[in-house]
Amino acid sequence: MRYLTSGESHGPQLTVIIEGVPANLAITAEEINEEMFKRQGGYGRGRRMQIEKDAIDIVSGVRNGYTLGSPITLVVTNDDFTHWRKIMGAAPISEEEQENMKRVITKPRPGHADLVGGMKYNHRDLRNVLERSSARETAARVAVGAVSKILLKQLDIHSYSRVIEIGGVKDENEYDLETIKANVDTNDVRVINEDIAQQMRDKINEAKKAGDSVGGVVQTIVEGLPVGIGSYVQYDRKLDGRIAQGVVSINAFKGVSFGAGFTAASKPGSEIQDEILYDATTGYYRGSNNLGGFEGGMSNGMPIIVNGVMKPIPTLYKPLNSVDINSKESFKASIERSDSCAVPAASVVAENVVAFEIARAVLEEFQSNHMEQLSAQVEQQRQLNIEF
């Protein structure tokens, strides 16, 4: 399974083409839109999310509620394009219109793709860079992840996401999976403990008042993945490696870890390695899950635990120093409409990115022309954990 996305932040639409989804997968636009709406929520979001009502249209690859096995095309209309039609239109314009173009950007924003992208593609109007490098593109990636989640759910593989840190405020409590599943969507910062959630809201409010922004750490958990998905035989077949690349490719993400993550560096091996146990009914399992469900780049049957670090959003209402690419004079960086914190929304994005990587690996592992074929093979693989 693979996909491509296209579209600019203030262009007419975002478009996604997904190839390799098995035939006969039951799917509806409403199911996909549940994930799309989650991404738009969260404490600290800016005005853009009040303008857009992200909802996908399925325009190919699905007939009467079931996939055909052919490429699936999804479209997300940008409602805000109405106000950007002249600026972001595809039709040629005159030199005079070009000179009088509004919202031309020549002052790159620190922490964004603006300056380097302009240098790479020779754009003197840096809007040509920021329109595509914008986190708006994550809406398309969530749509892909939503399709992946629907596929995985029909294989009895389920994912969840939550926030574990915002602006230095951490939820360090240990929760069992059932508690996480029951509480991930109960508040607007996607944190299990409500007292900690309020501390995070206060931290976001402080940043917003100061014209600043805050980042955090999000966690995705996947349960039900059979043993042996991925491989140890080549670097590019290791599933944890693929997931790490996918998570770090999300806008503003700067780090990823699995299970106990970076705390493993300060502990002895006897406290980190997960002991192997066996139950005659369920098969092999581990006494702990410090390795986050992976051994040798393969799933080991334990829940997959992925932690992603998101830096503070670089668009600030107290802008940092920059340099005008035309005059080379020092200026304060231009301000685009932005969020003071997008960590709760980023947890949704990360979950869907992880879901795609897992779905892709599952489809590579088994014959998957249609869902009946795929489901039978996944169940057969689950029996291996008991019978081996």
Image (spheres, rainbow, N blue to C red):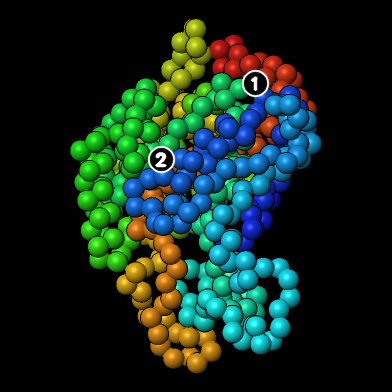
Which is in the foreground here, disc 2 or disc 1?
A: 2
Question: Residue 114: x, y in percent?
Answer: 53, 73
* Viewer-nearest residue: 205 or 275: 205
Q: Are marks 2 and 1 in contact (CB under 8 Å)?
A: no
Residue occupying image coordinates x 65% and y 37%: 360
Residue occupying image coordinates x 71% and y 68%: 90
* Mark pair 2, 1: CA separation: 26 Å
Of the image marks 2 and 1, the number of the one nearer the N terminus: 2
SS class, disc 1: helix
Residue occupying image coordinates x 58% and y 36%: 32
Amino acid bearing label 2: Gln
* Viewer-nearest residue: 346 or 384: 346
Q: Quadrant of residue 23?
A: top right
* Residue occupying the far top of the picture: 280
* Viewer-nearest residue: 152 or 137: 137
Question: Residue 40: x, y in percent?
Answer: 46, 46
**Residue 233 visible to an observer of this rendering:** no
In the image, is residue 47 above or below residue 373? Answer: below
* 252 horizontally vs 104: left or right: left
Amino acid bearing label 1: Val
* 91 horizontally vs 382: left or right: right
* Residue occupying the far front of the picture: 82
Dot 1 corresponds to which residue?
378
Dot 2 corresponds to which residue?
219
Residue occupying image coordinates x 30% and y 65%: 212
* 387 horizontally vs 205: left or right: right
